Amino acid sequence: MKIGMICYPSIGGSGLVATELGKSLAECGHQVHFISYTVPFKLAPFANNIYFHSVDPINYPLFNQNLYTFSLTAKIVDVVADYELDVVHAHYSIPHSLCAHLAREISTRDFKIITTLHGTDVTIVGQNKPLYSLNKYGIEKSDLVTTVSNFQKDHTIKYFGISNEIEVIYNFVDSDVFKPGNGSPTSCLAVPGEKIIMHVSNFRPPKNPLGVIEIFARVREKLSAKLVLVGDGPGLGEIKNKCREYDICDHVCFVGKVDNVETIIPMADCVIQPSFREAFGMVLLESMACQVPTVSSDVDGILEVVRHNETGFVAGPKQYDELASHVVEICSDSNLAKRLGTAGRDRAIAEFGKDKIVSRYLDCYERALNNGY
Ligand code: GMT
């Protein structure tokens, strides 16, 4: 099969899932064409069956925007024609799905469109009034629509009044890559005896960045711990202010963007994620695969990934006392940490294994191709 993969290339769940899916499909012998404005952060420079097509900005003084939507559409038309693509898989509906539809209108070659909804495309961006009808159109006109949790499916159907089928395909993790640490020294992050509490994020408002500090400040009252913040984003400024307010700056380590989080997550004693919104929660799954217990909020699709008191603990995103006391519990009881960590890895392998999920996407492509539209 010849597949076009459209995604955001920057660090984040949707781009990660698209890239890992494309890489796996290429390993199975399919030809995969990534179309994006820069090389996706997890895409190796070269691998068999993988092509990268750059969407270049259109800059002309008359336009005060760079017209990404049109340059992406034009690139899809070109790649479909040049490489005879069968399927275009749009990750994130705005604007990727719409660009694929417009490309199909323009193109002289027939191809199928699969759209995967990742979360904020529907819950936040999609609720922007001017985008509502565009988002609905992109979803309804796709040959097949998938999303990453039952929560996201129900929310999309309800909010957009969608009548076409939406398939739930959970995100996946490669448990050969995300695996328990080998006990290597963690002195760069914490001194001996200190526990490592980790948060991996884009520090946008839905991630509840201040909540992370609220939790950690309470944990610090009970035990010696370091907070390791992985990633970059707009909430970091207010996080730093909050650290000063609580006088905990010396106990917080900002490591910035890390492309290969599989190297750092295994160093954590506990990963925290008090998100306000989370269609799935990739970091929670990655932590589970690394055998690291998680403490998270209980919103949206999170409860389809983690299991309370089995792989970690959950509470409301603002129940800071409760979330913090769960972190303290995990860090003070090695048997509990081991039980949760082991169950997390077992669940990650059984329910979210790479091969099982990739074959579900392949099955979607085949069905779309066989059904006509
Ligand atoms: O969480 C974000 O802000 C990034 C966003 C993305 O597009 O990468 O994440 C969404 O997609 C991920 C992959 O499917 C999910 O794991 C995240 O839960 C989802 N984020 C939200 O729903 C807030």
Image: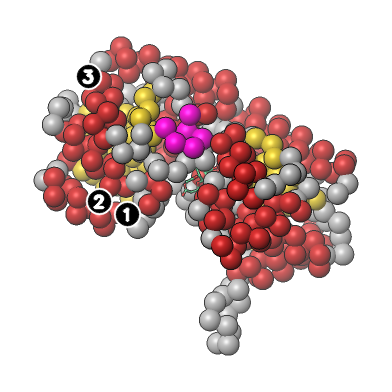
- Compared across the picture, whether 278 is left or right of 170 comes to left
Residue 185 seen in the figure: no
Could you tell me which secondary element the residue under label 3 belongs to?
Answer: helix
Query: Which residue position is annotated with label 2?
Result: 239
Q: Mark 1 points at which residue?
A: 235
Asked whether the beta carbons under mark 2 and mark 1 sit within 8 Å of each other, the answer is yes
**What element does badge 1 sit on?**
loop
- Percent of width and height locating residue 163: 74, 44
Read off the magenta span.
Answer: 298-303
Residue 302 within the segment the image draws in magenta? yes
* Pointer 3 with pointer 1, Cβ within 8 A: no
Residue drawn at 42 percent across, 17 percent down: 310
Residue 68 place in picture, x, y as percent? 60, 69
Would you place residue 3 above or below residue 318 in this image? Answer: below
Predominant SS along the magenta part? loop
Please say if 145 is above or below 314: below
